[in-house]
Each structure stands twice: as C-alpha cells, then as structure tokens.
Image: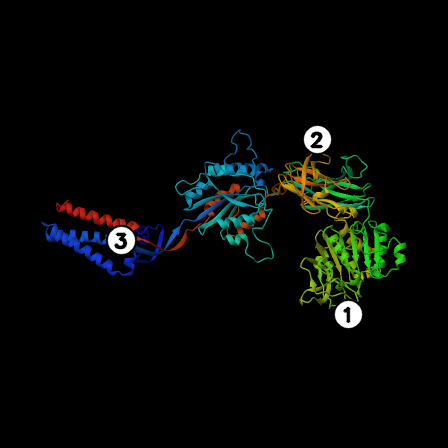
Amino acid sequence: MISKVIGWLLGISDVESVDGVSFSFAAPWAAVDPTWLLVGCLAAIGFAVWYYTRIQTGLSRLPAAALAATRALILVMLVVTLADPTVRLTANRMLKPVLYLVFDGTESMNIRDNLTPDELSALSKAVGTEGTGSQAAPPALTRQQWVKAYLEKADDNLINQLRDEHDLEIEYFVFDGESTSVARRVSASNDDEPSSPQAVAAELTTNGKVTALGELITDLGNQSSRRLGGVVMFSDFAHNSGTAPLGSSGHNDPTPLDRLGVPIYPIGIGAVSTRDLQVEIQPPLKMKKAERSTITVRVSQSGAEGESAQVTVTARPMQGESVVEPSGQDIIVGTQAAVFDTSIQYLEFPFIPQQSGRFLISASVDVLPGEVSEQNNQSSRAVNIVDDYIRLTFIENEPTWEWRFVKEVFHRDRLVGMEGFRTFLRSADPKVRQANEMFLPTLTPQRSEFFANDVIFLGDVPSEALNERFSRMLKQFVGQFGGGLVIVSGPNNGPSELINTEIADMLPVKLDRSLSIRASKPFRMEITPLGKQADIMQLGDSSSVDPLKPWENLGELPWYQPVLGVHSQANVLAQHPTDVCADGKTPQPLIATRRYGNGEVIYIGFNELWRLRRIHGERYYRQFWSQIISRLALSHALGSQKRFVLSMDQPEYQVDDRALLTVEAYDENFDPLTMDDLPAEGLQAQVFLGDEPGVQPSLIQLSESRPGRFEARVPVFEAGRFTARVSDPINGSPSEIRFDVVGATAEQRNPARNLALQKAMATSTGGKSYELQDAGQLVDDVKLEPVVEEISRSFPIWGTPLWFIVVVTLLMAEWIARKRANLA
C-alpha cells in the first residue's frame, strides 16, 4: 500500500513495489556547482526572516517565527524549482493483461453446414435463438452467422462476462487475405468506452481466400506486446496454406505457436465430418492413337462411408484438331461404381483412342444428397492424342552393344518405329550413310531438321567429332525447345570429352578430365530413395510386388565412369554402393537427371544396360528405354510443332486472376520471330469460354518479351474452361491451349472443420478447446495474471502530485496563519 502511495505521489500508477528513489538537479548551474543552489536557498531563508522581523512588525515571537519558516520554505522551493530537480524512481508496477479475440474471416466461414437436429438445437440454444412452444425449428445459419449471433446475444454474453470477471483488456482481430492470412484489428476501443460485442459482430466478414494459420500466429506475435496473456480464436481451423502452426514433423525449430508463447483457446465452429465427394482425373498428358492407355481417377469422400456413387469418364474432341466426331459430342470412356469403404480410392479406365487430336478428358461422380459442395464432383484435363512418331537420334562413334539393342528396341516401339529412329555413326562407311536413310550423313544438318528431333542420345564420341555448331544447337535444343538429351558413357572416350563444350553446362554431373573409368572391381548398382520413386525406374507391370526387383537382372557391372561431383540441381536415381566423389561423402552417381531450361538431361555412367536382357529378354530393357523417351519427348510438342508453342504459367486459376499466356514462335528454320517478322496487327490471341468462340471473343494483344517469345496477361472473370487460340504467322494454322478457371477456392474444396488441429493448438500451448455451444466455460477456465513491469524512470519532480501538494499546503498554511494574525 505504501508503495502504491509513493508511486502515485510521484505520478506513476499501479506501482507494486519501490526499490529505490534518488534525486538530482538538471539545471547546469546547479548540477555543476551546488554551491549556488545553497547560496540561493540561504538567501531565500534570510529574506523571509528579515521580512518578518524587520518589515512585518507587531507580531509576537512564535507567530513571526512560524510565518518566517513557512515563507522561507516556499521561497526555497521556488529556488529549487529553478534548479530543475529530477527524481529517479526504480520500481515494479502491475499492468492489466491483454486477451486477443480472433475471428476467422475466410470464405469457409460462409458455409452452411448440414447439422443434425441435436446439433442445430444445441447451437440455437447457445446463441439464444432456440424455438419455444409452437415456434418453428431454428434456422440453419452459416458459420459466421452463428458466431455473430453468439456475440450479439443479450444474456450470458461471453465478452461482457470476461470483462466483468477479469481485470483485463480485450483486443479484437479478424483474419483474412488473398494468398495468406493477415490479422486486422477491428472495433478499436479504449478503457473508457470499450467496444460493444454487437459492434465487433458487425465488422466480421468472410472475404479471405485461404486459411494460413501459421502466418496468422506469426502476424499476431508481431503485433503483440508482453502484456498479451492469451488468444481466443473462433474458427473452423481448416488450415490450407503456408506454414503449419504446429510446425513440420521432424524439425526441431520453434513453431509459430512456440514463438507466440501464450495459451490458445480455440472455439470451433463447423461440421467436423462433412458430406462431400471429390474427384480428380489423372490421364496421361499424351496418348497414342489406336494404342491402349489407362486413365486413373482419384475419388475422395468424407461422410459417405458404406455408400456408393457412379463415376463416369468421357472424352470430348476439341475444335481445331483433326477429329472425326462433331465438336462437343462426348465419347463415353467408361463408367464404374465407386463403393466408399475407404476415404480415398483409385479407379482405372482403359481407353483406346480411335482418332488423334486434342481431347478434353473429364470425370464426374454423382452428387450425393446433402453434399456441402458440388463444384468438386467433376474434374477435367486436356490431353494430346498423337498419330505422330517420336524422332530419336542416337549419336555414337562406333557400334556398341547398347547402340545395337537400343536401335532394335525403338524400331519396334509404337511411339518411334522405323520412321522415328535415326543415327549418326561416326565410324560408318560414307556410302552406307548415303544409301541407308537410318544413317544421318552429318552431325549438323539444317536447323529445321535438327530441331525437329525429340530426343537425342549422345554416346561414346570423341571431342573432335563434336564441333561448336553442334554443341550450340544441342544446348538450344534442350534449354529453349524442351528437347530431351541422354548421355551414355562409354569406355573409350567418356563424358570428359564434353569438357570445354556448351554441352557440359547442361549435365547433372561435374566432369574431370583426369578421371578415367574404374574397372578394378565388379559391383551392383544401388538405387537411391529418389530412384525408387522415379517413374522411369519402375519396371514390370501393376501386378509386380516390387517394381524395382527387375533391376536385379542387371547383375554385377564391370566398370563405370567416375565424375568429380553432382550438380546442385540434379536428382541421382542410382549410385555406386561404395565409391564417392571428390568431396569424400557423395556417392558416385550412375543414373542422374537434371532439368535444364525447358528440357531435361539424363546421365548414365556406363553403357551396360543391355545386361537387363538376361533371363527375361528385352522385356525390361525395352520398358526402361520406352519410359525414358516417353518422359523426355511426350512432355512437350513433337517434331516441328516445337516451332510454335502456346503455354500458360499454371494449369488452373481463380476467378479474377490474370493468367499469363506465352507463345514461343520461330520460323521454318527455327530462328526466333520478332515484331518485325509479324503482320501489321501483330500477334493476337482469341480467348473465349468453351471450345468455340462466341459472337465476340476477347482479343488479347501479345507483346514481345524477347526474340521468339511473346506474352500477354489474360484477365478471367468467371469460372469455366477457357480456350486461347493464336494463329501461326508463318503458315496461318491455329494453335490452341486450354486452361481452367475455378470458382471454388481452397476454402470451399475442403469444407470440414479440422478438429484435430483445433485441439492440438490448445494442448500444445496450455490452453483449452471448446465448441461454440460450450464457449461460456472459457470465463472460468482462462487464467490471466497481471504483468509485472520493471521501470526505472527519471522525471522532473515539480510536475508530480507530490510537489503540487507540498506547494499548495505551504501556501494555504501561510495564508491561514496570516489570517489568524490579522495580517490578511
């Protein structure tokens, strides 16, 4: 109590304890030499004594002495005030704790849950809207409407109860945002006029596109002070973007909740198990006409256990391609009944396309009664069905077993065939090159012929055979036109021959000319964890127990080509079991891949894969190489189609996004087109909803970003499948690309409340989790202690209540004394 009084007298409230008080003078003349202050005080005392003994006569000795002493004290205080006396106080004071009330402002809070009668009745009772007597059943509100009704109720209002039961301050936030969650303060209040619950409810919105709880917690921490004692959060906790609030498993770094450091009291709203079906179609991006392909459909469900629904897959030919059936007529690929005994299941639909062109492959699942969202019951993807062949060129110095067997494999491959396989064999007789069309007469043909390739194999070729023009065109072929390159090491020359060429810049490995092949001890190739997941390393069929077991047919390898190291952007799929690179810890790579520009490079550190033919013949050998060329070739336009290619920066957009359309445009010789090469109107794109333009499609002008590349931003204002069509300025033929614009945001795709996360946020921080109907218990459960603040403050004493009281007391005492002595 004494400490509080001392603190109040010195102008500081809520002082719990005073550790020390000291005085000094701030005026320079008093701080440097206190003698002047002493002289001033003595002069003031002398003047008061002289006045009441010499000037003010007629007083007895005692009243005169009392009046002289009072006047002397007043004058001394005046002199001391001129010296600017400063007090330094060291004390502890108690501050009110702050409680944050945070409200979910995302689109998922606009969902109207399908509640059971008991759930609906409990919520209606909690918000004070339950029906009584003959009244109708309470209405089903959206999640945010339930929260608003809870805040606005007159009786047992949570906010009012928190204020009444606890000495605290409440601050209010709503979180929303386009790509992350940002905490916005709402209903600014002060101690005199705190915001009413009704005013807080009026400011709640549902505009946020994502729920990023990790970023929200971080933002709250950035805005908080040390007085923050807890956070109450009203939400469905459907985290769907950014950092998880509990952090990533396997990491010991502090989580956003750890850094915030206060208890979280989550109050959940929304159905925990919603009734919803989601379908996602996963077709191959390219299919071969008249060849069997498999279309996979992923079906997810919640709240539909034990039920079934029919899944239908269709293919629709798109206008502008070589199709037989009229545009818009669907081809039924197949229908299957999905029985929902698990949360996720995969259905496979065999498809043998009978025509080539661009097709829209769609999957749809029947809508079940009571589903919260029907927008995710269908899914579509555009695919190319090709009647073309892949153009593969194998460059080798002289015939090897690998060269012979690869040639035979691709001659019979459905995607390559006799027309697609060509080779440049440096040791071949010039007459053979001229007479046999399989043999290329030169390594550097015309650009139009070279860039029409889809995949190039480069074998055991000496450096003198690789001229500068070839290296430059090969780098452009991969990086700019998206071609595939396979480097196959040989025992005679090896990849070290590529050092000091532009080809070396693209490799997944780092080369060293001093490293020669190692053949001292046979070894078995080891497949890495990345390799076990890679599609090109999966051999056998879907019935295989272990798709990696066929690699045992390779047996022991007699040699391999060591390298200096692995490129930072490479993925190593197979490695040596014991040998390491120059750093002493990275295993020597045997099969590695690397994305380079628009294309990909695959490095193989030996040419002994033909050993896969043992026991099973060419079955696995053919499968491996077929998977290699499918990966490298079918991910981009084939042949001369690479000359004019449309692309989007992403396959799917949200309404009101601005999609980026890019056109890579080259002439017949694969030289980049510029604005000077285009007609007067430039390069224009028709953008329209659906497969055919309407009466007036949008015309978008593309601008040149660099030679051969043209770009335009396309605004999209409604959901659906859009088509962008651009005519090739060289031959006038139209090229198209399709992209999806969805109205369903991440908030609507997974509408269920994440109860597990809600409870985990409470238990991991020392808080407690509640349902909205039980949130009243928070008043008794929340424990917020005042915050002790250590202060050490210097301030002029003449501005404190103590100084004012002393001065007024002395003046009043002198006045009363003079009045009683009949001097006033």
Mark seen at residue 695: 2
Q: How many marks?
A: 3
Residue that protrudes farthest toward the left in the picture? 58
- Determine contact: label 3, label 1, CB under 8 Å: no
- Please say whether residue 102 is visible from this viewpoint: yes
Disc with the residue nearer the chain's start (3 vs 2): 3
Residue 55 or residue 330, whichever sits in front: 55
Q: In the rendered structure, which amino acid carries the disc numbered 1? A: Lys
- Determine contact: label 2, label 1, CB under 8 Å: no
Q: CA distance from mark 3 to mark 2?
A: 88 Å
Number of other residues with Cα within 10 Å of mark 1, as a class: few under 14, some 14 to 19, many 20 or more: few
Q: Height in image: 459 above or below 822?
A: below
Q: What is the quadrant of residue 366 in the picture? A: top right
Q: CA distance from mark 2 to mark 1?
A: 73 Å
Tell me how the rendering is colored.
Answer: rainbow
In the displayed structure, does residue 813 sit left or right of residue 179?
left
Q: Height in image: 469 above or below 368?
A: below
User: Pointer 3: what residue?
Assistant: 82
| Secondary structure type for disc 3 | helix
| Secondary structure type for disc 2 | loop
Residue that protrudes farthest toward the top in the picture? 134
Nearest to viewer (mark 2 / mark 1): 2
Disc with the residue nearer the chain's start (2 vs 1): 1
User: Pointer 1: what residue?
Assistant: 521
In the displayed structure, does residue 629 sit left or right of residue 182?
right
* Quadrant containing the C terminus in the rendered view: top left
Q: What is the quadrant of residue 207 in the picture? A: top right
- Horizontal and vertical percent position of residue 201: 49, 38
Disc with the residue nearer the chain's start (3 vs 1): 3
- Horizontal and vertical percent position of residue 383: 75, 43
